Image (cartoon, rainbow, N blue to C red):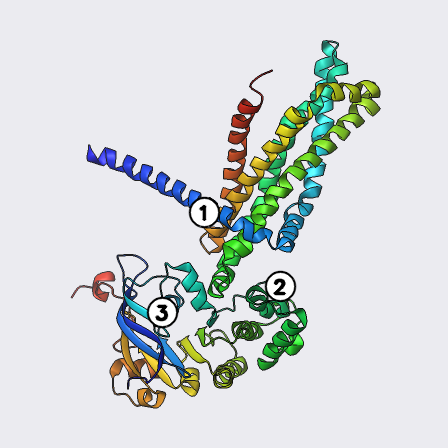
Amino acid sequence: MIPAEPIIEIDHVTFGYDASRSILNDVSLTFERGKVTAILGGSGCGKTTLLRLIGGVYPANAGAVRFDGEVVDATDKEALFRLRRRLGMLFQFGALFTDLSVFENVAFPLREHTDLDEAMIRDIVLLKLNAVGLRGAAPLRISAISGGMARRVALARAIALDPELIMYDEPFAGLDPISMGVAANLIRTLNDTTDATSLIVSHDVEECFSICDYAYLMSSQGRVVAHGPPLELSASDDPEVRQFIRGEPDGPVRFHYPARPLAEDFGVRP
Amino acid sequence: MVSLIAPIGRTTLDILRALGHHAFFFADLLRNVPTALRRPYLVVAQIHAIGNLSLVIIMASGLAVGFVLALQMYYALVTYGAAESLGLIVNLSLVRELGPVVTGLLFAGRAGTSLTAEIGLMKAGEQLAAMDMMAIDPRSRVLAPRFIGGIVSMPILAILFSTVGILGAYVVAVLLIGVDAGNFWSIMQTGVDVRRDVGNGIVKSMVFGVICTFVALYQGYETQATPEGVAHATTRTVVIASLGVLAMDFILTAMMFSTP
């Protein structure tokens, strides 16, 4: 299924941090406006790298990344910053500013990018914190809140300027079941109420499938294995898709790292 | 033959690349200074963090150096019946050399390491990356105010170091040893030139401020985002900044005081 109105297009992108090893190999993905799309895959498959390419942190070695029809050019800082004002990103561990309070963290992008007066900033910050259930935590220091709360504060900060696109880097990693459920609900609710587009990078199949409209599954070789709505992927017969979704230890993705034969390593005679 | 030449070429290229990287970083810092100056509250906060919080170690060291300098100089001068020159020698030693240099070395150890560790940990915690993704340039928002803070703080700290040092020397020379107080102060007034001695001392300390703060920020910003990376970066800050201060002190002294 080709999405009708894409906000992000990854067009035959190849990328590697150095010339010797490619992280992404000729991948093409499309993210539809207004939808929650998940990119699933094991560790090291290039999911977070994909987010960095969308944000223009690195330029693609080949192919193009388009945001709302405009090519993301990592070398044009001015255009890049213009684009980044339209997106919010939730980092894996929140990346909150530890020298600021919860309130000041959420107020940070507002103070930097707007000329709003203090009363208006206060109202917006409290509204955003209320949306993530942490209005009461506004005066707390970052060191005084839990990991789950930090993730929610970071989410409030990411949506402070009402971005068109919200990118989530492993939003469920390291969270307890309650915090995980809360985070999943927040992602879905915020996407629907703010009319934004959400992009989740995760390896948590269950949580992602419970909230996303569409999902891409990536392999460790940096290519797209399968994509489709969650129900369609769940019913897939593809062995690689089945292995990942069911969490099977062995299959097309090998349990053992490539090694010499066992008998050879242990000196067993044939 | 090629195997002998190749490492030399590689090392030369590495050095040139590193120098170029440092130069670009420095130019970028300078380019962001006007933006930082438009938000003085950020600079003031850094002057407080870098300057005020270094006061105790700078003043305690200044006092100790003043005590020792007065004692050592007195014993040397009294042998030649020149003890009345004590005030002048102490003053010139402090404002021309010891004030800027010792403050520079202490600054590298106290404020420099603190800056490197802070920036390095911000990088490790993805705070700088988060800022960048918010379309806020960390060099403008985080580095430039610290750079200005360091350059402003350093001369003030050096002046305080020398002032406290002179007071320390007064305590030892006049109150403890019994050198004439009028002579101690009057010889300073006649022998110390404000522009040549005090002014050049301040210029030196400003240059040392640039060196120490630049090295600290560069090491923090370019550190590997791991605990080992931050540890190595803080060590490099102390070593490089201290050597930079000592090397630049020789060059500046040769330029400033080449004539009697």
Q: What's the amino acid at mark 2?
A: Leu
The residue that appears at 21% across and 62% down in the rendered structure is: A264
How many numbered tags mark residues here? 3
* Chain identity of mark 3: A
Foreground mark, 2 or 1, reads 1
Question: Horizontal placement of A147 versus B59: left or right?
Answer: left
Identify the residue at image location x=66%, y=26%.
B195
Q: CA distance from mark 2 to mark 3?
A: 30 Å
Residue occupied by mark 1: B25
Q: Secondary structure at mark 1?
A: helix
**Alpha carbon of mark 2 to alpha carbon of mark 1: how far?**
27 Å
> On the image, numbered disc 3 is attached to which residue?
A50
Q: Is residue B185 above or below residue A11?
A: above
The furthest residue to the left: A270
Q: Can you say whether B23 is above or below A78 in the image?
A: above
Q: In the rendered image, which quarter is residue B54 located in?
A: top right
The 10 Å Cα crowd at callout 1, few under 14, some 14 to 19, many 20 or more, is some
- Quadrant of the rendered image containing residue B98: top right
